[in-house]
Structure formats: structure tokens, C-alpha cells
């Protein structure tokens, strides 16, 4: 189930993430650029902290649950969010070595509206280029990353489909989803 998450998280670890205060569209670009520097300058043992500080894992986890999240008790939802965050942390830590030698450039920005943008970056490592798109949303005066597209796959959208596939089975529960995060 989580193969796409593993791949996306590994690529996430080699790329910029962001949050910044301001609802100016240029701030969406600035937050991606400045976060890239923050992450690239962090030592491997602290990379997961740096990465996770720049993404809205709660929003991604809630989106991932989709309609199933509305029926969960707050304690179950909290368990899911914690399992999701722990899984991301483990994947980032396992791939921390991919941070060295990374260069990131913002190559395009598309405002979906005043508080929702897609920022396209080119990530270079060891002479290879990769395009990564970031969906950033401004809420309560702060921009944050809420999805990531690598190789045509949006992380949150893919995970939502995977979670729905599990929870759509007869007798399935949130425990079945959490078990997939190991």
C-alpha cells in the first residue's frame, strides 16, 4: 500500500518544503526556496525534524482519511495522525543520506487562488534533474505544504486512495490502516 508514500517521502527528503507567514503569492515561492536551504544545511540526524517542521502533516493525514475521517472518534483520528507522522519520520530518517549535494530551483508558480498555489521546483543531485511540484495553502496567515507531486503522483491523493481501499473493505477499521504504517 505505501510503496508510493515510500518513494514520495524519499524524494521529499531530497527536496524543499515550506511554511511562512504572509498571504502574498510570492511568499509561497519564498517559503519553498528558504525551506530548501534549511533542510540542505541540516545534519542527517536532524533531517526528519527539519522536513516535518515544514509540512502540514495533520492536514495531509486528515485529507488522506477522506470521508472516513468524519466517522472516527477524536482518539482514533489522533492515533492515525500519529501513525502517519511516525511513518513519514521513519521514511525520511532512512533516506536522510539523499540530502547531501541537492540543489533546488523554483521554476514555475501557479496561483490557483489567493491562498492556494502550485510551486514547481527542479531538484538537482549528482547531475540528475527531477521536477517536483508542491501544493501550498495559506491558512491563518501561514503558508504550508499540503501535497507533493513526484513523477506524476500526488502523495496525499495517492495515500487517500490507498486508505479508502482498505477502509472500504467489509469489517475494516482504522487499525487496519494504522497497521500498514508498521
Image (cartoon, rainbow, N blue to C red):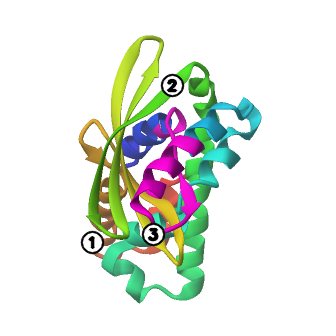
As measured in the structure, the alpha-carbon distance from the residue carrying label 3 to the one carrying label 1 is: 32 Å
Q: Is residue 29 visible?
A: yes
- Neighbours of disc 2 within 10 Å: few (<14), some (14-19), many (20+): some
- Counting from the top left corner in percent of width and height, residue 134 is at 38, 49
- Name the residue located 40 percent from the left edge and 88 percent from the top edge: 71
- Counting from the top left corner in percent of width and height, residue 88 is at 55, 50
Residue 17 forms part of the magenta stretch: yes
- Neighbours of disc 3 within 10 Å: few (<14), some (14-19), many (20+): many
Q: Considering the numbered disc 3 on the image, is that residue within a helix, a strand or a loop? A: strand
The residue lying toward the viewer, choosing from 172 and 52, is 52
Q: Considering the numbered disc 2 on the image, is that residue within a helix, a strand or a loop? A: strand
Quick check: 121 above or below 79? above
The label shown at residue 168 is 1
- The stretch of residues the image draws in magenta is 12-34
Say whether disc 2 or disc 1 marks the residue closer to the N-terminus.
2
The label shown at residue 138 is 3
As measured in the structure, the alpha-carbon distance from the residue carrying label 2 to the one carrying label 1 is: 41 Å
The residue lying toward the viewer, choosing from 149 and 71, is 149
The residue lying toward the viewer, choosing from 135 and 157, is 135
Amino acid at each position: 500500500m505505501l510503496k508510493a508514500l515510500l518513494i514520495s517521502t524519499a524524494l521529499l527528503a531530497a527536496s524543499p518544503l515550506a511554511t511562512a507567514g504572509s498571504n502574498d503569492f510570492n511568499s509561497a515561492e519564498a517559503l519553498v526556496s528558504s525551506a530548501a536551504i534549511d533542510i540542505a544545511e541540516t545534519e542527517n540526524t536532524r533531517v526528519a525534524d527539519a522536513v516535518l517542521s515544514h509540512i502540514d502533516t495533520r492536514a495531509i493525514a486528515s485529507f488522506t482519511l477522506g470521508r472516513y475521517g468524519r466517522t472516527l472518534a477524536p482518539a482514533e483520528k489522533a492515533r492515525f495522525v500519529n501513525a502517519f507522522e511516525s511513518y513519514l519520520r521513519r521514511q525520511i530518517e532512512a533516506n536522510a543520506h539523499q540530502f547531501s549535494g541537492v540543489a533546488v530551483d523554483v521554476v514555475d508558480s501557479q496561483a490557483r487562488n489567493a491562498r492556494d498555489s502550485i510551486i514547481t521546483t527542479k531538484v538537482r543531485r549528482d547531475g540528475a534533474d527531477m521536477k517536483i511540484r508542491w501544493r501550498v495553502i495559506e491558512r491563518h496567515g501561514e503558508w504550508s505544504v499540503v501535497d507533493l507531486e513526484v513523477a506524476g503522483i500526488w502523495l496525499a491523493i495517492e495515500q487517500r486512495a490507498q486508505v479508502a481501499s482498505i477502509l472500504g473493505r467489509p469489517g475494516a477499521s482504522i487499525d487496519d490502516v494504522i497497521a500498514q504504517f508498521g
